[in-house]
Image (cartoon, rainbow, N blue to C red):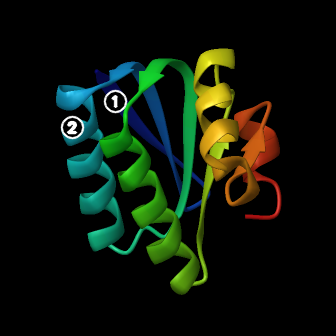
């Protein structure tokens, strides 16, 4: 898994590429937990390059979403691939996460 970070007007944007599997989920968890620990509660995840996500990755996203919203922030998802979007719909995560077509759209109003 490859994770890159950039800031846009105080909002942290992570670009994820690869599989959020047993290894990738741990990497993603470490990066996101560290960001939230540093007080970064407004996060956008560009997931256009994510081809797979497992339950550990979904748990991390749910945890970060809950923590960020409790701190007047959010976790917004961008460009879910059809396979990943299907997983979100099957487990009902599409009701909790805001999903956007572009990073720019996700940044609006955050």
The x, y position of residue 47, in whole percent, is 55, 28
In the rendered image, the vertical position of residue 46 relative to residue 52, given as above or below? below
Label 2 crowd bin: few (<14), some (14–19), many (20+), radius 10 Å: some
Q: Is residue 23 left or right of residue 38?
A: left
Query: Along the line of sight, which residue is nearer the eye, 66 or 110?
Result: 66
The residue beneath circle 1 is 3
Q: Is residue 36 left or right of residue 89?
A: left
Q: Is residue 89 left or right of residue 57?
A: right
Query: Along the line of sight, which residue is nearer the eye, 7 or 47?
Result: 47
Mark 2 or 1 closer to N-term? 1
Circle 1 — which element?
Answer: strand
Label 1 crowd bin: few (<14), some (14–19), many (20+), radius 10 Å: some
Q: Is residue 36 left or right of residue 46?
A: left
The residue beneath circle 2 is 27
The x, y position of residue 82, in whole percent, is 69, 17
Circle 2 — which element?
Answer: helix
> Which residue reaches farthest front?
90
Residue for point 69% across, 27% down: 79
The x, y position of residue 7, in whole percent, is 50, 48
The quadrant of the image that shows the N terminus is: top left
Mark 2 vs mark 1, CA separation in Å: 8 Å
């Amino acid at each position: 898994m490859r994770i890159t970070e950039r800031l846009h007007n105080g909002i942290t944007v992570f670009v994820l590429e690869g599989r959020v599997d047993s290894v990738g989920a741990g990497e993603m968890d470490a990066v996101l937990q560290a960001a939230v620990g540093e007080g970064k509660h407004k996060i956008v995840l560009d997931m256009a390059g994510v081809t797979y996500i497992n339950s550990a990755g979904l748990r991390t996203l749910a945890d970060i979403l809950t923590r960020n919203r409790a701190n007047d922030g959010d976790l917004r998802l961008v460009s879910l691939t059809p396979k990943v979007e299907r997983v979100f719909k099957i487990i009902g995560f599409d009701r909790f996460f805001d999903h956007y077509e572009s990073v720019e759209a996700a940044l609006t109003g955050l």
